[in-house]
Amino acid sequence: MKEYSFFNRDLSWLSFNERVLMEAENEHVPLLERIRFLSIYSSNLDEFYRVRMPVLMAIDNFDDNTGLNNNYYKAQFLINQQQQRFGHLLANQILPALKAKNIHWLYNETIPELITDQTARIFFNEVLAYIRLFSVAKDENGFFAENNKLYQAVILSDAAGTERLQLITIPSDDLPRLYAVSKDDQQYVVFLDDIIRDNLHYLFPAEKIIGVFNIKITRNAELNIKEEIDDLDEDITIALEKELKKRDLGIATRFLCQPGIPLRYLYKIIYALNLENSAVVEGGYYHNMKDLSNFPLQEPELNYPKWPALPNLLLKKDETLFDQIQKKDLMIHVPYQNYDPVLRFFNEAANDSFVEEIYVTLYRVADNSRIVNALMTAAKNGKKVSVMVELKARFDEANNIKWASRMKASGVKIIYSNKELKVHAKVALVKRKIRDQVQYLGLLATGNLNESTARFYTDHILLTANQVMLAELEQLFGFLRKKKKKPLLEDAINFEHLLVAQFNLQQKFIELIDWEITNARKGLPAGIIIKMNNLEERVLITKLYEASNAGVQVQLIVRSVCCLIPGVKGQSENIKIKRIVDRYLEHGRIFLFHNNGSKDVFMGSADWMNRNIYGRIEVCFPIYDQELKIRLIEILNLQLEDTVQAVELNEELQNNYCAGEVNIRSQEAIYGFLKGITTQATESNTT
């Protein structure tokens, strides 16, 4: 069997985060949006240290013979390079550009005397109530540096010259991280950190301040639900809540410090906080730069121009959404189009007199979810409502527990997945009964049922009354109610339309690729276009390599992790990979197979990652409506033609901007394309 090569997933992920940093460096991006991309880069890196760095560190500790341990050091090298670019960009481009706009962002600067009266008032009136002081020494117990919390390490000296270490909390969870202050027509932006630093003399009036250093500790975020926990809902919930309380107490993976700390003070801090085994990273003067997402000045001309969400539901006065779905499949493309039809789908289900049952999977829920409120209303209205809540959606566990408890109290039947099998599918099923006839209405999506993320994640939602396909969806919900680790023989479901991970998804995709290989070898047209967030699973990647070697043209749009190496002779000469980073987060998963001109198109929740293929319930689904299929293909083509926001990934894992005779920015082009469809539909409706 031919040996193939693959990118390391973690190095590939860092390559994606570099692409985010490139957008912050892009002078064509509005200034405040560039600052937002710095925030996204910083947030991504924090998650990398919490989720992936523990894995790399573990490999480094026990696997000395495979060479995999080198990836830990490669990752550190890439991160250091990117951090230097981050600092250079901030100092040499962002700050001067703000000054040119009469905005003075005080970055590692002393607060000017002319505004210290204002910053002092902020300190005493707002900040002081949240300040906590910790005297730290190795032999003292009771202090634990929390995960990703900001601290100032203050070195103090008393009259006798005895030094001690004091830690001060920077309460950025409770207060704005950045404050806007104006004086004499000049705008200033000041860090909360510096407002505290400038008033330390009040906190330590009898001691000399030797040094003040901003620090942060990042800890392992992995949860550990023990095998012996029963699969009772109450047991899993209690166990998860206990683990969530311990999440911020995990092993320290990174000690982030500002540059220039004298070594004797650096070691004093490391020793006092038990950080000897964590990676010591010299970052910028300030940490948690994800807080830049709330930059306190919002000048419209420094942001992207508005793209109002397009209307996509043209109903007559007495017509319902359910009426329209029965006539024809509908598709919503968020955030280009508004989310109203999704909300209306659940609102109508809650109050439609013919609806008897509602089934939904929830993975990440909005903080104030109108969808969940509709489900609770449905239950109170006597509908049988069953909701599969995924408690193990990373960093959303607490929010999901909260909503599950509220739904349960409202009469909703809550189903939790087995602790070893996540449910990542994005589907809903409404079951109506009209004159003894059962009628299904369904919602199948590429993204979460979350009206908050729908404002900036590009996703696609299908509303359908395809009875055969939705009957299969009902069977899937029947399996989910059993809460099994894996489908057994007695759980076999003959899915002919849906592609469901743990049942037929991987095999179906292999068959579709094999069919393209067969056509290519016959000299027939053959091609594959796939858009997804992550591509890691080696069985499917190997099948794409085989397709390339057979002459199939494979075009991939992969936003983040990509372990497939393109452009390698004898392996992937016919494979090209693009990444698109723009104002919206690319999130939709679309799969197109040429099929000798017939063009099979699927959408769904599944990336091609090990976790999606082997450890989750995922649902992908075919697009049968010819009009919707043509629309999706046009969207894919616009993205493949992108010469502004797309980069091409090469065999060295480098992001290279795409060149073209015509500038095409795919997100802008897609918005224009959908706007044209809306205009045509409106004109047709009025005539």
Image: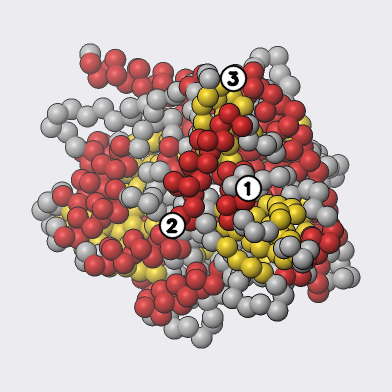
Q: Which mark is residue 197?
A: 1
SS at mark 2 in the image: loop
Q: Amino acid at mark 3?
A: Asn
Q: Amino acid at mark 1?
A: Arg
Q: Which mark is residue 242?
A: none
Q: Is residue 377 above or below residue 236?
A: above
Q: Is residue 645 above or below residue 82?
A: above
Classed neighbour count for the residue bearing mark 3: other residues with Cα under 10 Å, few (<14), some (14–19), many (≥20)? few
Q: Residue at left 57%, top 63%? A: 133
Q: Is residue 140 above or below residue 635?
A: below
Contact? badges 2 and 1 (CB < 8 Å): no
Q: Position of residue 278 (x, y in %)?
A: 75, 65
Camera sees residue 265: yes
In-front residue for pair 23/66: 23
The CA distance from mark 2 to mark 1 is 42 Å
Q: Residue at left 38%, top 58%? A: 361
Residue carrying label 2 = 363
Q: Position of residue 203 (x, y in %)?
A: 58, 56
Q: Please indicate whether residue 322 sits to the left or right of residue 305 in the image.
A: left
SS at mark 3 in the image: loop
SS at mark 1 in the image: helix
Q: Please indicate whether residue 87 sits to the left or right of residue 416 in the image.
A: right
Q: Position of residue 313 (x, y in %)?
A: 29, 30
Contact? badges 3 and 1 (CB < 8 Å): no
Q: Residue at left 37%, top 26%? A: 310
Check the picture and name the quadrant holding the N terminus. bottom right
Classed neighbour count for the residue bearing mark 2: other residues with Cα under 10 Å, few (<14), some (14–19), many (≥20)? many
Q: Amino acid at mark 2?
A: Tyr
Sequence-earlier tag: 2 or 1? 1
Residue carrying label 3 = 102
